[in-house]
């Protein structure tokens, strides 16, 4: 069921969040956008936890079996008149990018000009959209911009993966275009392990393409930005200090926020080269002397995108400024700090000292969201 559009639509600029995959992605954004004096509405599926935030003023249902039938999105834009749209997951990003380039296959109705204009304003130059080949485009863009990047190739068969490994050595990393938070990322250290995996049903399922990537040693780093018209307006770096699980590809549960020039400069170059707009995040591996090698691009908010206020570079307030809200100075710690990511660190160790010693980003002030998270805990683990 679609909720009634919020009243007094001209009171604050309106941000439309789009979430088409279940999970935690972007669940912290609504309260931080609201703090930036923005009105928040949501279009997507109820299994996306961001839709349950108490700061979401209206919910517009997009049936999970609707595929590329974008009528719900068109109706949402027509009714709510948003000033900006933000995809929260890979599927939402892909659908919005296809709308932006005007090449959405299978759409049940023509795309109104106002819808295409909104998407292009929000996501930037359509010529830079990665569409379905996010990892391939990130690799190509990084090479063109002179940004160090892990070597990679398409991984359609065992033979292709093995040939790559013979050239670049083991271990190798296999990644799906749809992977997030370490899911869909496999580290393989022998040819036997590679053969076993590429013989599995999971690899043979071609719904999402695979790429094979060279292994790069180092600490995991990440950089999140809000950009507009090919220029970074706010950015934030972090280093992983604790993983949620034992797997090397497990998602972060504790990160250290800091300023990291190598990651920031690389991301600014990539944004400029692609004319990107909106929220983006990149993963890097940082070697012992601080050199950063790009391993992944996410054309959406990432796990640290809401934390910029802690270092005085608030991504949500940067969006608000583009929408006409005065960007007042915000008190911040202004120095490096650790953050225990919720619910990852809590699930890793409910008695972890980092839950007290670090900044804990549990949504204490979003009771509606917090209640749903606790009720659905069995699904989060």
Image: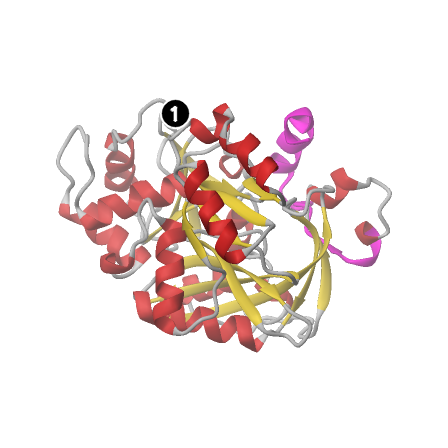
Task: Inspect this view and state whether residue 259 appears.
Answer: yes
Residue 176 shown in magenta? no
Name the quadrant containing residue 271: bottom left
Q: Secondary structure at mark 1?
A: loop
From the viewer's perspective, is residue 290 above or below residue 240? Answer: below
Q: Which residue is more in the foreground, 151 or 139?
A: 151
Quarter holding the N terminus is top left
Q: Residue at x 56, y 30 (%)?
A: 196
| Coloring basis for residues | secondary structure
Instruction: Give coordinates of residue 143: x percent, y percent.
Output: 38, 67
Residue 366 shown in magenta? yes
Q: Residue at x 23, y 44 (%)?
A: 99
Q: Which residue is more in the foreground, 233 or 349?
A: 349
From the viewer's perspective, is residue 215 above or below residue 30? Answer: below
Q: Which residue is mark 1?
A: 64
Quarter holding the C terminus is top right
Left/right placement of residue 97 relative to residue 335 reads: left
Q: Residue at x 42, y 71 (%)?
A: 232
**How many discs mark residues in the rendered view?**
1
Segment tinted magenta in the rendering:
356-381
From the viewer's perspective, is residue 68 above or below residue 125? Answer: above
Name the quadrant containing residue 96: top left
Left/right placement of residue 334 relative to residue 10 reads: right
Q: Residue at x 56, y 49 (%)?
A: 172
The residue carrying pointer 1 sits among few (fewer than 14), some (14 to 19) or many (20 or more) residues within 10 Å by Cα, namely few
Instruction: Give coordinates of residue 212: x percent, y percent.
Output: 47, 47
Q: Which residue is more in the foreground, 359 or 207?
A: 207
Task: Inspect this view and state whether residue 323 appears.
Answer: no
Instruction: Give coordinates of residue 373: x percent, y percent.
Output: 64, 33
Left/right placement of residue 248 relative to residue 98 reads: right
């Amino acid at each position: 069921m679609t909720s009634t559009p919020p009243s007094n639509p001209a009171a604050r600029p309106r941000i439309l969040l789009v979430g088409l995959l279940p999970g935690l992605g972007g669940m912290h954004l609504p309260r931080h956008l609201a703090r930036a004096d923005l009105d928040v509405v949501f279009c997507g599926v109820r299994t996306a936890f961001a839709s349950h935030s108490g700061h979401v003023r209206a919910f517009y249902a997009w049936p999970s079996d609707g595929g590329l039938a974008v009528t719900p999105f068109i109706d949402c834009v027509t009714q709510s008149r948003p000033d900006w749209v933000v995809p929260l997951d890979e599927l939402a990003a892909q659908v919005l990018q296809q709308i932006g380039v005007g090449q959405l296959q299978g759409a049940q109705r023509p795309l109104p000009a106002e819808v295409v204009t909104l998407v292009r304003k929000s996501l930037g130059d359509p010529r830079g959209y990665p569409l379905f080949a996010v990892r391939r485009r990130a690799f190509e863009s990084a090479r063109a911009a002179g940004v160090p990047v892990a070597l990679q190739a398409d991984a359609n068969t065992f033979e292709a993966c093995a040939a790559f490994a013979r050239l670049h050595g083991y271990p190798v990393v296999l990644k799906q275009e749809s992977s997030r938070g370490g899911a869909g990322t496999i580290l393989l250290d022998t040819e036997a392990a590679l053969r076993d995996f590429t013989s599995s049903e999971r690899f043979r399922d071609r719904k999402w393409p695979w790429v094979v990537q060279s292994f790069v040693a180092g600490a995991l780093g990440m950089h999140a930005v809000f950009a507009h018209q090919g220029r970074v307006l706010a950015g934030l770096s972090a280093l992983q200090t604790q993983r949620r699980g034992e797997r090397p590809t497990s998602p972060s549960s504790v990160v250290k926020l800091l300023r990291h020039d190598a990651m920031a400069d690389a991301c600014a170059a990539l944004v400029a080269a692609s004319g990107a707009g909106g929220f983006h995040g990149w993963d890097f591996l940082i070697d012992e002397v601080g050199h950063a090698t790009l391993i992944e691009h996410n054309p959406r908010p990432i796990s640290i995108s809401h934390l910029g206020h802690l270092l005085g570079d608030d991504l949500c307030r940067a969006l608000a400024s583009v929408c006409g809200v005065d960007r007042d100075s915000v008190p911040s710690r202004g120095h490096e700090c650790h953050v225990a990511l919720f619910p990852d660190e809590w699930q890793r160790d409910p008695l972890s000292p980092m839950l007290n010693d670090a900044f804990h980003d549990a949504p204490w002030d979003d009771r509606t969201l917090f209640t749903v998270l606790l009720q659905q805990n069995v699904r989060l683990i």
